[in-house]
Image (cartoon, coloured by chain):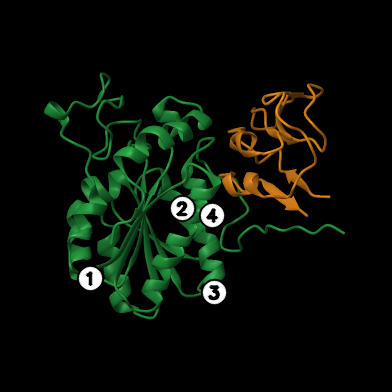
Amino acid sequence: MAKIKIDREKCKGCLLCVSVCPKGLITQAEKLNKKGVKPAQFSRRAISSEGGTPLKAGKKGGACLGCSLCAVICPDCCIEVWK
Amino acid sequence: MIKKINNHPKSLRKIPTHYCAGCGHGLAHRLIAEVVDELGIREKVIAIAPVGCAVVAYDYWDFDCSEAAHGRALAVATAIKRVRPDNIVFTYQGDGDLAAIGTNETIHAANRGENLTVIFINNAVYGMTGGQMAPTTLLQQKTATTPKGRDQKLHGYPLKISEILALLPGVKYIERVSLHSPQEITKAKRAIKQAFTNQIEGLGFSLVEVLSSCPTYWGLSPNQALSWMREVMVKEFPLGRIK
């Protein structure tokens, strides 16, 4: 089962990863990081509003594919992909 | 057992950059670092950093770098390459650096057919100085110095430096790529790799024009900026191999 790890302190909150995730598993965190921005966060299961804003609510859910699209588009190398 | 499938490039330091959220410079830096790692030229490569937002690129790349005065990166690169022909020398320049103040150096270095690689970041605006109009700004595009949009009667047309350079016999390879989607980013990396390979093989002047986003001075969110590139910018600056 694939997963990603997002470096929440390095993330600048541009949310480009949110826009490319085919499963809609990345959301914006509610809690600020030390930079003072709300970073992206990964949830293993389908989106819920718990702990994150459901930016892509209603999009087809499912587990992470390990497709790396988020890591490819991240301008700040914040995302590690595990597969 | 799951394994990590993407590694942080060795040629890129693990420090946060000063770029705004969603800026294309971070992506371009990473693509170059990945290409340098893959070609195994980290000990031989010398980068010339520009003046502009990427002026401190030497803080982020973990290989030899030099800084040049505004627009003069290709003049400095020419000198370094002629003195040290075994090194792989590339310049990393924005549109204000390469296409405005450095047009002279750019055209003459290309015309001499110097065996160099140029990574030209085109985001259609001056970033470091506060979002003023660049030569590559699109018609009707609003900037700090064109608040009603760029008017061709007053400001002329967007400068297509890649098409101009493609006319010169000294130029070996020119390709325009974009960073607006993961697919295009993959193509951009392939083009950058080709440009470095050309220099290793001694083929001559290679330039990759990378369309990049500037959400801050376009006044858009990072996602809207990518949509704007896809829908507007790519029509003015068509992608693909130019020479």
Q: Is residue A33 left or right of residue B76?
A: right
Residue B60, visible in the rendered structure: no
The N terminus of chain B, quarter of image: bottom right
Q: Amino acid at mark 3?
A: Gly
Residue at image x 34%, y 48%? B51
Q: Mark 2: give few (<14), some (14-19) or many (20+) Cα within 10 Å.
A: many
Q: In the rendered image, which quarter is residue A64 located in?
A: top right
- Closer to the N terminus: mark 1 or mark 4? 4
The residue at which mark 1 appears reads as: B113
- Closer to the N terminus: mark 4 or mark 3? 4
Q: Colour of chain A?
A: orange
Which numbered dot is residue B40?
3
The C terminus of chain B, quarter of image: bottom left
Residue at image x 34%, y 35%? B129
Q: At which x and y percent is residue B137?
A: 28, 35
**Viewer-side label of 2, 1:** 1
**Viewer-side label of 3, 2:** 3
The residue at which mark 4 appears reads as: B30
Q: Mark 3: give few (<14), some (14-19) or many (20+) Cα within 10 Å.
A: few
Q: Mark 4: give few (<14), some (14-19) or many (20+) Cα within 10 Å.
A: many
Tag 1 near tag 4, CB within 8 Å? no
Label 1 chain ID: B
Label 2 chain ID: B
Q: Amino acid at mark 2?
A: Ala
Residue in front for this viewpoint, B61 or B139: B139
Identify the chain drawn in green: B
